[in-house]
Image (tube, rainbow, N blue to C red):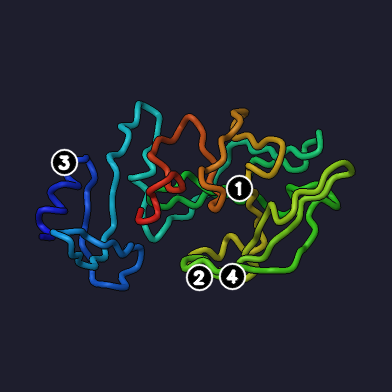
Amino acid sequence: MLRSWLAAQERRGISVARHPPGSPGASVVLVPWGGDHEEVAVTTRPEPVEPAAGQESVWDYPRPPRLETFTGSITVELGGRTIASTTRAWRVLETSHPPTYYLPAEAFADGVLRETPGSSWCEWKGRASYYDLVTASRVAPKAAWTYRDPSPAFRALAGAVAVMAAQVDRCTVDGEEVVPQPGGFYGGWITSSVVGPFKGIPGSAGW
């Protein structure tokens, strides 16, 4: 039963790995067979886009994610003005995700970052706190986040700020306007230098 279902997924171009129930990153699916079903924990891996010269595939990124410095130019615009600009940032690179960029808090204009209640938990980095982004003409609620006391592997990110590109006017990397990571939940930035498929599209929960 299970072997036939797995073979069908392979014919559809979907690579499937079976895991014990409760495995991190695994999704539970019900495999139909003759009116009955079997509960199986699986992860699915899509066919990666082949990167061209100078491009990175998000499927070559590691998990747990890797932290690296970034010295290209980054800008964030909101309310018709540039609210952040830096050439000293960090990228977090994780399998299936476009890079998430973290800017030093001092890269933001005075008064733009407004602390707001609430937090979330990342299994790799720890507890995140949130900011509203504020200008005279616009407020973007919980559009940015920071890790005040990140895990040891991400200690360099303490106090650095990431931005949800979909909630501001515009974000750029080296002058190129980014595309927000699909799905509205994750904060990665897509540029022409990275190829997917990207986590966040329909059907990617198990990636």
First in residue order: circle 3 vs circle 2: 3
CA–CA distance in space, label 1 to label 3? 42 Å
Crowding near the residue tagged with mark 4, few <14, some 14–19, many ≥20 C-alpha atoms within 10 Å: some
First in residue order: circle 2 vs circle 1: 1
Disc nearest the viewer among 4 and 2: 4
Crowding near the residue tagged with mark 3, few <14, some 14–19, many ≥20 C-alpha atoms within 10 Å: few
- Which quarter of the picture shows residue 70? top right
Q: Identify whether 153 is placed above or below 79.
A: below
CA–CA distance in space, label 4 to label 1? 20 Å
Point out residue 130 in the picture as x, y percentages from the top left corner: 69, 61
Residue drawn at point x = 30 percent, y = 39 percent: 48
Which residue is tagged 1?
89
Which residue is tagged 3?
11
CA–CA distance in space, label 3 to label 2? 42 Å
Crowding near the residue tagged with mark 1, few <14, some 14–19, many ≥20 C-alpha atoms within 10 Å: many
First in residue order: circle 4 vs circle 1: 1
- Which quarter of the picture shows residue 55? top left
Amino acid type at image mark 2: Pro
Point out residue 128 in the picture as x, y percentages from the top left corner: 61, 66
Amino acid type at image mark 1: Ala
Are the two marked residues, 2 and 1, in contact with CB atoms closer than 8 angstroms?
A: no
- Which label is found at residue 152? 2
Disc nearest the viewer among 1 and 3: 3
Amino acid type at image mark 4: Arg
Residue drawn at point x = 35 percent, y = 56 percent: 206
Residue drawn at point x = 77 percent, y = 37 percent: 82
Disc nearest the viewer among 4 and 1: 4
Q: Secondary structure at mark 4?
A: strand
